[in-house]
Image (cartoon, rainbow, N blue to C red):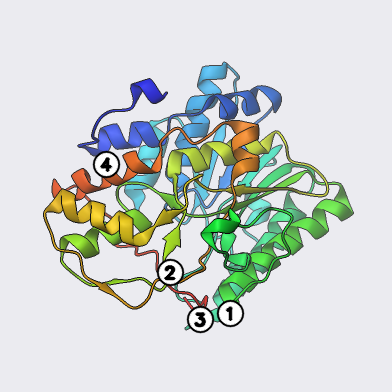
């Protein structure tokens, strides 16, 4: 795919095509797993592109199967677009009374529902969405294999020199959101061990595309000449298509007890350096405040790279794409990541 990458991405048609392009590892996963796939939380930031990627992958490997996207679909355009691509959609509030029983029985499940921003003001919703709902999904789909999206926020912060947190590291969640991500994993592990349910836990740090993500947050600050807080001095990011492709690839490797996988880019990016690059793109003077933190939420994604291939889009290209997209007036989502928050209070 690397030879097919454009120098710039200048419209959403090209962007959506790139975001839904399956990797070879994702294709291999569908060759190894039979049957329909249901995506719970298909209407979120990553859900639409992952669901479309599944549809494209299934078509490419030539297996007749349904790809089903489940969400409240508050934006009906998202639902209609998925239907146009051949995805079966179901509008459903998974936290309402007995909604899971109405969903079809399928052998493969990807759970993407999650609640993060607003945790400080509504912690009970965070626990209900991230922990209670996970348990309910595991009970409902006890005969299926399941991939569950988690977060690298459940680890302790690390120095860049450490190489980042490994899957074998003991979780040390800070703040209620991180606690609920660990709770989500514990519920999955409980049902996986008890029922022999194959599961995979995807600890993600941080997926980006051109309309949202850490890189866009930083680019906006530089473009509008706002000061950059250096408290969180480093970050590792991964192109959303690569993150979704690894999650699909992990479907075939789900196991009991669960298969745990960090999904992160290989680069430990320095925030100061990134912002200075954006400053050159925009011809803007970059302002910094605070002192550069020695630790940050950094994941070591080498296990996933070894198993499924290194990310197809490197961080340098992502920075360039983001700068051109923002300067050219490309559409963006109003969904800041708040990655710079060090205490886990979202």
Residue 135 x/y as whole percent: 72, 62
Alpha carbon separation for disc pair 4 and 2:
23 Å
Q: CA distance from mark 2 to mark 3?
A: 25 Å
Which dot marks residue 122?
3
What x and y, as percent, mark residue 178?
60, 70
Whichever of callouts 4 and 2 sits on the residue coming sooner in the sequence is 2
Image quadrant where residue 13 sits:
top left
Specify whether 301 is left or right of 232.
right
- Residue at position x 40%, y 31% from top? 85
The answer to whether residue 221 is left or right of residue 207 is left
Q: Nearer the viewer, mark 2 or mark 1?
A: 2
Q: Earlier in the sequence, mark 2 or mark 3?
A: 3
Mark 3 neighbour density, 10 Å: few (under 14) some (14–19) many (20 or more): few
- From the image, state whether disc 2 or disc 3 is nearer to you: 2
Mark identifier at residue 124: 1
Residue 321 marker? 4
Q: CA distance from mark 2 to mark 1?
A: 27 Å
Q: Which residue position holds label 2?
A: 232
Mark 4 near mark 1, Cβ–Cβ under 8 Å?
no
Work out how far the residue at label 1 is from the one at label 3, CA to CA, in angstroms.
6 Å
Which residue is farthest bottom? 121
Q: CA distance from mark 4 to mark 1?
A: 38 Å
Q: Quick one: which residue is furthest to the top in this view?
A: 62
- Does the residue at mark 1 contact the one at mark 3 (Cβ under 8 Å)? yes
Frontmost of labels 4 and 2 is: 2
> Which element carries disc 2, helix, strand or loop?
loop
Spatial CA distance of label 3 from label 4 is 36 Å
């Amino acid at each position: 795919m690397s030879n097919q990458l454009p120098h710039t991405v200048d419209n959403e048609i090209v962007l959506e095509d790139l975001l839904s392009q399956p990797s070879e590892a994702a294709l291999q996963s569908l060759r190894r797993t039979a049957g329909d796939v249901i995506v719970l939380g298909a209407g979120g930031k990553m859900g639409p592109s992952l669901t479309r990627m599944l549809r494209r992958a299934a078509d490419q490997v030539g297996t007749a199967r349904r790809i089903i996207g489940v969400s409240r679909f508050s934006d009906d355009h998202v639902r209609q677009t998925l239907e146009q691509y051949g995805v079966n959609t179901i509008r459903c509030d998974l936290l309402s009374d007995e909604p899971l029983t109405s969903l079809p029985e399928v052998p493969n499940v990807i759970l993407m529902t999650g609640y993060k921003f607003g945790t400080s003001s509504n912690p009970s919703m965070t626990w209900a969405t991230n922990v209670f709902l996970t348990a309910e999904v595991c009970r409902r789909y006890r005969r299926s294999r399941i991939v569950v999206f988690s977060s690298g926020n459940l680890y302790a912060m690390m120095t860049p020199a450490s190489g980042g947190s490994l899957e074998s590291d003991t979780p040390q969640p800070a703040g209620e959101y991180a606690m609920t991500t660990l709770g989500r994993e514990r519920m999955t592990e409980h049902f996986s061990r008890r029922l022999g349910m194959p599961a995979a836990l995807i600890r993600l740090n941080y997926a980006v595309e051109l309309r949202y993500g850490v890189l866009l947050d930083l680019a906006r600050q530089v473009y509008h000449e706002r000061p950059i807080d250096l408290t969180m001095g480093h970050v590792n990011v991964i192109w959303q298509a690569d993150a979704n492709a690894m999650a699909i690839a992990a479907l075939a490797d789900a196991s009991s007890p669960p298969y745990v996988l960090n999904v992160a880019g290989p680069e430990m990016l320095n925030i100061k350096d990134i912002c200075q690059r954006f400053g050159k793109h925009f011809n803007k003077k970059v302002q910094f405040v605070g002192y550069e933190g020695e630790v940050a939420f950094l994941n070591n994604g080498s296990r996933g790279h070894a198993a499924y291939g290194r990310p197809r889009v490197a961080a340098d290209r992502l920075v360039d794409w983001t700068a051109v997209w923002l300067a050219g007036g490309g559409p963006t989502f109003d969904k800041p990541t708040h990655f710079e928050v060090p205490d886990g209070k979202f």
